Image (cartoon, rainbow, N blue to C red):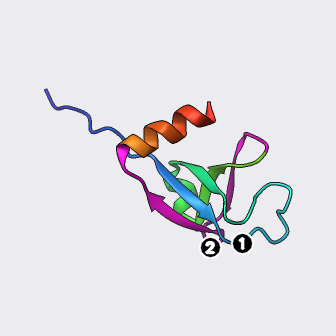
Amino acid sequence: MKKRAKQQKYFAVCINNKRYEASLERGKLYRVIPDEDAESHGYLRVVDESGEDYGYSAERFFRLEVPRPLERALLRASS
């Protein structure tokens, strides 16, 4: 029986919030929701200031992989 690999959680820093100032803060770290379809169209699905996940142009973000301990701490802090 194959073990399922845990899906890596990603985070991204907003580097451009022009026209989305109420939804995104420049310089803030956001959780990325995996969405292959959105990514294939150049978008990232992130949990924004409303607490909901929306698709934004990937060019607005710098995507990061974080170490597992930091990932767990960030996910705990956001719940």
Residue at 38% from the left image edge and 41% from the top image edge: 69
Q: Position of residue 16 (x, y in %)?
A: 71, 72
In the picture as drawn, the residue positioned furthest to the top comes out as 1
Sequence-first tag of 2 and 1:
1
Find residue 17 and report its image quarter.
Answer: bottom right
Q: Mark 2 touching mark 1, by CB under 8 A?
A: yes
Identity of the amino acid at label 1? Asn
In the picture as drawn, the residue positioned furthest to the left comes out as 1
Between residue 74 and residue 9, name the one nearer to us.
74
Q: Position of residue 76 (x, y in %)?
A: 54, 32
Question: What residue is shown with label 2?
Answer: 59
Q: Which corner quadrant holds the N terminus?
A: top left
Whether 26 is drawn above or below 54: the answer is below
Which is closer to the viewer, label 2 or label 1?
A: 1
Between residue 70 and residue 31, name the one nearer to us.
70
Question: What residue is shown with label 1?
Answer: 16
Whether 13 is drawn above or below 1: the answer is below
Find residue 26 and report its image quarter.
Answer: bottom right
Q: In the displayed structure, does residue 8 sit left or right of residue 10? A: left
* Magenta highlight range: 50-68
Residue at 53% from the left image edge and 50% from the top image edge: 35
SS for tag 2? Answer: helix
Q: Which corner quadrant holds the C terminus?
A: top right
Report how far apart the C-alphas of labels 2 and 1 lie in the structure. Answer: 8 Å
Identity of the amino acid at label 2? Glu
Q: How many marks?
A: 2
